[in-house]
Amino acid sequence: MIIVLFGKPGAGKGTQAPLLAEALGVKTLATGDVLRAAVREGTARGREAKGYMERGDLVPDEVILAIVKEALEGPDYREGAILDGVVRTVPQAEGLSAALQELSRGVDAVLCFDIDNEEIIRRLAGRTVCEKCQTPYSDAEPGSTCRRPECGGKLARRKDDEPEAIRRRLEVYEAQTAPVFDWYQQHGTRVLRIDAVGGVDEVTRRAREALGR
Ligand code: AMP
C-alpha cells in the first residue's frame, strides 16, 4: 500500500506520517528527513540540496526521484510506504508513477491535508524539530530534549521555518505543488481530503477514516 501525503508545509504531514505508518504496518519515507540527514553528513547530495532547502526552494526533481527510487527498490518498503513530502511537482508525480510501474506497483491513494495559510504561519513560527529523529514539536523550546525515550536528541528551530523562508515555501507550494493534486485526479488515483486543523489524535482519526483503515 503506497499512500502519498499531500499538503502545504506545516500541514501536519510529518506528525501524522509515523502514526499512520504504524497503524498500517508500513514505513514512512520523508524526503525532507533524508535530505536533512545528507546535509548534516555533508554528502554530495547534501551539499547540492542545502542552498535550495535553506531558501525554501524545491530541490531538483532528479535528486528527489533518485532518493525515492533507491528507497522503494530496497527491502524497507516492500510492504508499502507512507510518502511524506513527496510528491511536490508534476514531474515527480510522473517519475514516481513510472518507477512504481516498473515494480508492478502504484499509488493507492493521495491523502490531502487541508489547512489555510494563517494557521500554517502560526504553526511553523512555533515549531521545533528533533535534530536526531526529526520529530516535530509545537510546544517545546529550542535546546530542550526530544521526548521520545529512545532518542534524547536536542530540539532546534529549522532554518526554513524563518518568516522569509516560510513565505517562499508557500509561494512554491502554490506554483509547483498545488497542480499535483489535479494531476492525480486526472490520472484516476484515489484522492482523499481531510481537515488538517485539530488535535493530533483527531487528525489521525480523520485520516484513517478517509483511508478506510
Ligand atoms: P520538508 O521537511 O518536507 O518540509 O522538506 C524540507 C525541504 O526539503 C523542502 O523545503 C525542499 O527544499 C526539500 N524537499 C523535500 N522534499 C522535496 C521534494 N519532494 N521535492 C523538492 N524538494 C524537496
Image: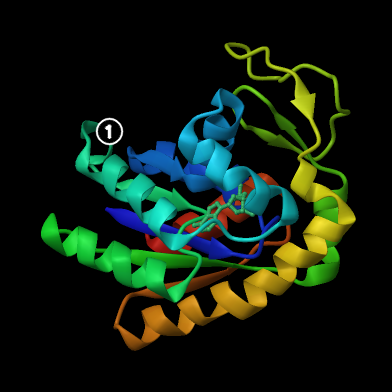
Q: Could you tell me if residue 33 is visible in this image?
A: no
Residue 145 in sight in this render: yes
**In the rendered image, the vertical position of residue 19 relative to residue 142, given as above or below:** below
Q: Which quarter of the figure has residue 67?
A: top left
What residue is rendered at 65% in x and 77% in y? 174
Would residue 73 be found to the left or right of residue 137 on screen? left
**In terms of image quadrants, where is residue 185?**
bottom left
Q: Secondary structure at mark 1?
A: helix
Residue nearest the observer in this picture, 139 or 59: 59
Q: Is mark 1 within 8 Å of ligand 1?
A: no
| Residue 123 place in picture, x, y as percent | 82, 52
Q: Which residue is mark 1?
A: 76
Quadrant where the C terminus is found in the figure = bottom left
Query: Image quarter for residue 106?
Result: bottom left
| Residue 193 % position (x, y) | 53, 72
Specify few, some or many for label 1: CA neighbours under 10 Å numbering under 14, 14-19, or 20 or more: some
Query: Horizontal placement of 146 versus 124: left or right?
Result: left
Q: Position of residue 138 (x, y in %)?
A: 80, 40
Position of 111 with respect to 93 (left or right) is right
* Closer to us: 86 or 57: 57
Residue 206 against residue 130 in the figure, above or below: below
Q: Which residue shows up at 59% across the image and 33% down it? A: 39
Q: Which residue occupies 44% across, 61% down?
A: 61
**Image position of 66 (left or right of 196):** left
Q: Position of residue 184 (x, y in %)?
A: 38, 78
The amino acid type of the residue labelled 1 equals Asp
